[in-house]
Image (tube, grey):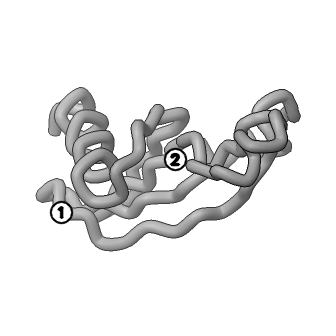
């Protein structure tokens, strides 16, 4: 398994399906799946109109060994300038 292909496929999924530019910030392999953590800017007209900081969404994407996206979910939201409090043991 080429990890570069995995990262590329997840980024392509976000661009094609969710129309968001994704930045992979973590990858972990389990026995028969990959868990990929992605950071993306959430499009918010409300934020822009009020000149507020961008809101960053952190997503968790489950990918099969065959590079099939099995599912994804947003696990947190934060303003761009806030530090994350992610558990480094997970990734």
Mark seen at residue 4? none
Q: Where is mark 2, residue-wise?
A: 37
Q: Element at badge 1?
A: loop
Q: Nearer the viewer, residue 39 or 36?
A: 39
Name which quarter of the figure residue 83 lies in.
top right
Marks 2 & 1, CB-CB < 8 Å contact: no
Front residue of this view, candidates 31 and 4: 4
Question: Residue 80 at what x, y percent from top left?
Answer: 76, 33
Residue under the image location 23 percent in, 27 percent down: 4
Question: In x, y percent, where is residue 72?
Answer: 43, 67
Q: Left or right: where does residue 10 sit relative to residue 57? A: left
Above or below — where is 86 with respect to 67?
A: above
In the picture, which quadrant includes the C terminus? top right
Q: Quadrant of residue 54?
A: top right
Q: Which residue is mark 1?
A: 68
The quarter of the picture where the N terminus appears is top left
What is the count of numbered marks?
A: 2
Query: Looking at the picture, how far across and down is residue 10, in whole percent?
Result: 30, 46
> What residue do we see at 25% from left, 64% from top?
69
Foreground of the two, 72 or 56: 56
Report crowding for label 2: few under 14, some 14 to 19, many 20 or more residues within 10 A (C-alpha).
Answer: many
Residue closest to the eye, 83 or 3: 83
Left or right, residue 5 beside residue 58: left
Residue 84 shows in this picture: no
Q: Is residue 27 visible?
A: yes
Of the numbered discs 2 and 1, the one sitting upstream in the chain is: 2
């Amino acid at each position: 398994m080429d990890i570069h292909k995995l990262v590329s496929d997840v980024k392509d999924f976000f661009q094609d399906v969710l129309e968001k530019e994704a930045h992979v910030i973590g990858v972990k392999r389990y026995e028969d799946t990959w868990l990929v953590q992605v950071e993306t800017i959430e499009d918010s007209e409300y934020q822009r109109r009020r000149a507020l900081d961008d809101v960053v969404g952190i997503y968790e994407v489950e990918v099969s060994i065959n590079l099939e996206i099995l599912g994804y979910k947003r696990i947190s939201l934060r303003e761009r300038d806030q530090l994350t409090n992610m558990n480094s043991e997970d990734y």
